[in-house]
Image (spheres, helix red, strand yellow):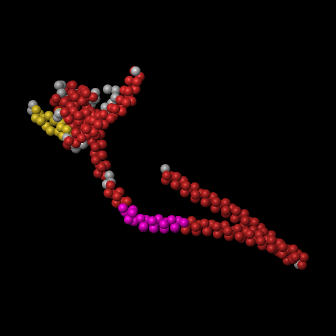
């Protein structure tokens, strides 16, 4: 490769750099050829102008990226200001935090009350129906002794109440089971979310 | 050389060379590429980086109808060089401790 070819190739590859950057590199390599004993010797020593250009472009990119990073990096004062603001507004932040916690607890408590209320209601209903079954059953025996149709009516009522009571009890059991599943789902979903955040 | 000369070592050697006397591109490139066994093409990036970091400055001297660009070490360059020299002594001591002393033990 001749000096001309070398310099032309180098100039072409560096053409996107700022003029100052190009001039410094081209001046160095022109001078290198000037000083060298022969053109061929210098070209042989320096090797590929593409490789040289790649290195210069990479160095320039790294240098400007580093300077940009410095410029865009936040100053320590930014962090100091954040900390000071946090301290200054700590009563407000604590207040907001406490309010949020209270709201969450209230919602959880309300949920619990509703669930327990519904379950309790069904349980009470089934117990009441079973109690009625016993009452009508007991009442039917003396009634049979006096007036048979009255006894039959009371016995029928007892059986109806008993049947409803058993159904109600079974339904209460299912309701408990479903509530348990729901709670488990909510709990595991919360844990999974926490796990994902931790990652 | 089997062991590579890294960028910091190149910086240190350029600064040490300039600390003795001002010199120009071709000369320092020849000296160090031969002295360190590195490619001639690896010197320009080092000189440019040191110049940008304020460790050296350049000035042009007219010579036989053209300009020759000389490199001169700055006070900051001397500070950096001093740090490199201290680092090198420590580095050499540590590596010697592991590499050379174990060899001596084997020989004895």
Q: Picture coordinates of residue A135 (x, y %)?
A: 80, 74
Q: Is residue A27 visible?
A: no
Tell me which residue sits at (61%, 60%) in the image. Answer: A183
Q: Quadrant of residue B17?
A: top left
Q: Closest to the observer: A7 or B60?
A: B60
Tell which of B58 and B15 is nearer to you: B15
Find the residue positioned furthest to the front. B108
The image quadrant where one finds the N terminus of chain A is top left
Task: Decide if residue A73 is in sight here.
Answer: yes
> Which image quarter: residue A128?
bottom right
User: Magenta residues?
Assistant: A84-105
* Left or right of residue A33: residue A164: right
Give residue B55's position: percent from left, percent from top. 22, 41
Q: Residue A67, relative to residue A122: is it above or below?
A: above
Closer to the camera, B56 or A123?
B56
Q: Is residue A28 magenta?
A: no
Residue A149 lies, with reference to residue B8, above or below; the image says below
Q: Main secondary structure of the magenta part?
A: helix
Q: Nearer the viewer, residue A195 or B100?
A: B100
- Quarter of the rendering containing residue B108: top left
Q: Is residue A25 left or right of residue A197?
A: left
């Amino acid at each position: 490769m001749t000096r001309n070819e070398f310099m032309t190739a180098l100039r072409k590859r560096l053409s996107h750099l700022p003029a100052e950057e190009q001039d410094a590199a081209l001046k160095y390599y022109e001078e290198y050829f000037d000083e060298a004993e022969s053109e061929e010797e210098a070209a042989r020593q320096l090797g590929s102008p593409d490789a040289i250009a790649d290195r210069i472009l990479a160095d320039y990119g790294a240098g400007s990226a580093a300077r940009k990073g410095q410029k865009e990096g936040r100053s320590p004062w930014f962090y100091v200001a954040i900390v000071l603001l946090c301290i200054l507004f700590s009563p407000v932040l604590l207040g907001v935090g406490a309010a949020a916690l209270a709201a969450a607890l209230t919602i959880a408590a309300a949920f619990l009350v509703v669930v327990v209320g519904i379950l309790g209601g069904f349980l009470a209903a089934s117990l009441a129906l079973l109690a009625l079954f016993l009452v009508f059953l007991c009442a039917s025996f003396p009634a049979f002794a006096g007036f048979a149709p009255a006894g039959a009516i009371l016995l029928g009522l007892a059986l109806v109440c008993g049947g409803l009571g058993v159904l109600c009890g079974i339904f209460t059991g299912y309701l408990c089971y479903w509530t348990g599943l729901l709670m488990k789902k909510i709990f595991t979903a919360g844990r999974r979310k926490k796990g994902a955040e931790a990652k | 050389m089997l062991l590579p000369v890294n960028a910091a070592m190149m910086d240190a050697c350029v600064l040490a060379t300039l600390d003795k006397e001002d010199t120009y591109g071709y000369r320092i490139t020849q000296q160090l590429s031969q002295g360190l066994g590195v490619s001639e093409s690896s010197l320009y990036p080092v000189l440019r980086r040191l110049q940008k970091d304020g460790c050296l400055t350049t000035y042009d001297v007219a010579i036989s109808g053209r300009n020759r660009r000389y490199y001169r070490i700055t006070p900051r360059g001397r500070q950096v060089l001093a740090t490199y020299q201290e680092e090198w002594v420590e580095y050499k001591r540590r590596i010697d401790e592991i590499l050379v002393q174990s060899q001596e033990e084997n020989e004895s």
